[in-house]
Image: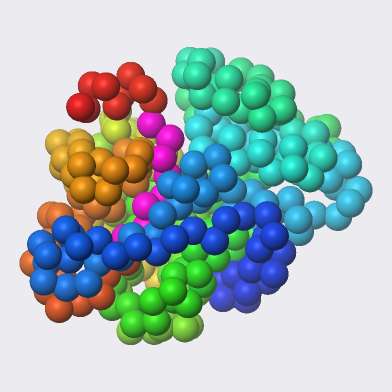
Amino acid sequence: MLIDVHREVIDALGRIEPHVRRTMLISSDHLSGLCGGSVYLKLENLQHTGSFKVRGAMNKLLSMTDEERIRGVAAASSGNHGAAVAYCAAKLGTRGIVFVPEGADSQKVRTIEDLGTEVRRHGGDAVESERFARKYAVRNGLTYISPYNDPKVIGGQGTIAAEFISQCRRIDTVLASLGGGGLISGMAGFLKKELPETEIIGCSPENSQVMIKSIEAGRILDLPSLPTLSDGTAGGVEKDAVTFELCRRLVDVYTSVTEDEIADGLRLFLEKHHMLIEGAAAVSIAAFMKERERFQGKTVVITICGANISPRTLKRLL
């Protein structure tokens, strides 16, 4: 049975509004000129912790009982989700544990620790860390916070769409980066009730298309991911992920972009908008650039999902 995403988003709006930033929706003169339309950028790179992930994590924590928050939470992520859970747990006075792979980037680990959350290393990759974190949470009476496979997390992410339709009522197309599907499921589930004619485009790196390939196959696949600048969307999808059916029903178009296209999109954004973004955010920009002719005369919103790129990667790209 599909979850009522629209209801989840409405509920999330009331919960998280005092705790998250209402991020700006700005017009991009440069991108608008390239397609002969009106292009807007939803700046979640300016959200707390530099990522939209705070929305879902905060909604999940606030939907828990006082007793559950006292016992604490567990998550698995060496990136934006881990930082979001750590930030939200600290704000709400909740004990948190974040599991990361053995080879997790030391700078990302320090970011989570600096936010006041304990970090433990387990497993050779993110999938192993997630499986262990789930089991650890059950054994120790903690609440596991998934990065995408949870109605409350999906509802929190969908508040982005609720914000930007109040900032720009006419929207023909929305582009968003696609990994496990939490972001695009939340946005699409809300938009298809409010603006049903809006086209939703899911954008992934060619090197990690697990959700796209799973949708094509009609079932969730266990596929490897190659290294990608879009590390925020890389990796597998859980076998029972509620996002799979939501993406299958709600997302209109899927597209993928190469690593060179992602790098070009990131550099273009830095040059024209003078703000930092990460690879996952550049994926949706690259997808727009790749198919810009089809947006002539349309009003387009590109979701800039995050800003967290390592200095080493940024230096290499520049």
- Horizontal side, residue 242 vs residue 70: left or right: left
Give the percent coordinates (x, y) of residue 44: 45, 52
Query: Residue 312, relative to residue 13: is it above or below?
Result: above
Give the percent coordinates (x, y) of residue 129: 58, 28
Q: Is residue 49 visible?
A: yes
Q: Quadrant of the C terminus?
A: top left
Q: Is residue 243 visible?
A: no
Query: Residue 85, relative to residue 105: is it above or below?
Result: below
- Horizontal side, residue 242 vs residue 66: left or right: left
Query: Residue 46, relative to residue 5: is it above or below?
Result: above
Bounds of the magenta segment:
302-309
Give the percent coordinates (x, y) of residue 304: 37, 52
Along the viewing direction, whichever of 36 and 215 lies nearer the viewer: 36
Could you tell me which residue is drawn at 29 percent across and 43 percent down? 274
Image quarter of residue 75: top right
Image quarter of residue 22: bottom right
Q: Main secondary structure of the magenta part?
A: loop
Could you tell me which residue is drawn at 80 percent across and 34 percent down? 95
- Horizontal side, residue 126 vs residue 95: left or right: left
Query: Residue 144, relative to residue 163: is it above or below?
Result: above
Q: Quadrant of the N terminus?
A: bottom right
Could you tell me which residue is drawn at 28 percent across and 78 percent down? 172
- Horizontal side, residue 18 vs residue 51: left or right: right
Along the viewing direction, whichever of 23 and 200 lies nearer the viewer: 23
